[in-house]
Amino acid sequence: MKSLSGNLVIAITALAGALTFAPVRAAAPSVTIAYQPMVSTGLAAKQPFEAWFVFDRPADPNIPGYAVPAGATMRLTFPKEFMPLGGHPHLEGALLYGWPHGAVPVPFTVTQNEPDPRVVVVRINEAISAGPPERPGLKAIHVRTGELNPASPGDYSIVVQLINAGSLSGTFNAVAHITDEAVPNIAAYNQLHQGKDEDWQRVKPGMEASLPIDFLVTLPDSSRSSITVTPTGDGTFGILSDGKPVGSIRTQGVAIELTPEPFGPGFSRLGIFRVRAKAGTQIGTAEIIASLNGGTQYKITLVVE
């Protein structure tokens, strides 16, 4: 297996992680694995596995995800290098519309297979429809399992079997990239918007985006620090942790204006910061790209129309 450096930069978007995927049959949808946005250890060696399994649907909420019938199951079979935790491990997850905190409100269970604890089963108990932008259908599944990641970094194949899942049904091999240590992680923090999607917004020229853009920074091997944003003078912004640079924010595409909005010390100590986005006069698409040094990257899309 190919060893990965602890300083590896892993780029993620709202619906893409650092993973390659080989479907068993060409007609089947593809799946990728992304870092769970709220943790930095989910794909690190010797840490409990926690990640997103992301389906091949764009982040744009106007593009439907997958409709899933009641009773569909996702069966995950981990290779022998993943060690089951003893006792009664805490398993949990979320069915997602494709952005952080955009949970699909249907009941489901996450269980460990009794004969083989390296098998984890997610069962969806009610049907999921692919509806309007606010509820575009299933695009990702967040899973925290009872497996400990391998001790050695590298690429490990996880078998993903979707059963009684309509157009999603099939068996796939997904390769999880395990790093030798946890990485700094950044992602949108939609929790302050009552579940609305700030990741992909549409705005008229010269107008401000209706939702402010909140990011959550999670740094490994350190307690929560005060996260702030400061202009750098070249049109970008620096992300600071207790005054020390840890990342940056920039834009690309059509011109937009970003303005940091101060949070109170409570949010700042939780690692959350906010920027406002205002469209310029040009029609087109802009991206807001937040990156952490030696860690992940996250993109917000703003469509000016």
Image (spheres, grey):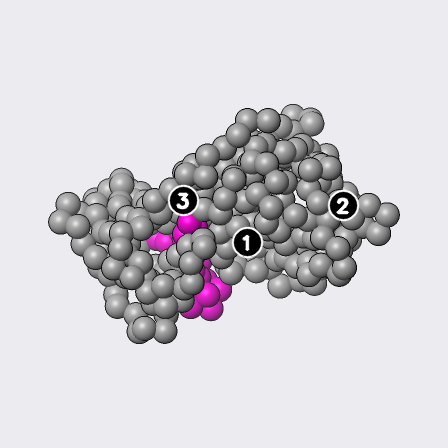
Q: Do the numbered discs 1 and 3 sit on residues whose CB atoms are within 8 Å?
A: no
Specify whether residue 207 is in view.
no
Density class for disc 2 (Cα within 10 Å; few <14, some 14-19, many ≥20) is: many
Q: Give the percent coordinates (x, y) of residue 262.
A: 26, 68
Residue 30 drawn at (x, y percent)? 60, 35
Spatial CA distance of label 2 from label 3 is 29 Å
Circle 2 SS class: strand
State the separation of the CA atoms marked 1 and 3: 24 Å
Q: Nearer the viewer, mark 2 or mark 1?
A: 2
Residue marked by disc 2: 119
Report which residue position mark 3 lands on.
295
Could you tell me which residue is drawn at 60 percent across and 46 percent down?
A: 46
Residue displayed at 73% across by 48% down: 84
Secondary structure beneath label 1 = loop
Residue 201 in magenta stretch? yes
Q: Which numbered disc, 1 or 3, marks the residue closer to the eye?
A: 3
Distance from the alpha carbon under mark 2 to that under mark 1: 25 Å
Residue at 42%, 58% in the rendered image: 222
Residue 118, given in percent of the width and then of the height, sits at 75, 45
Task: Tell me the number on the disc at residue 97.
Answer: 1
Residue extending furthest left? Answer: 233
Which picture quadrant has residue 276?
bottom left
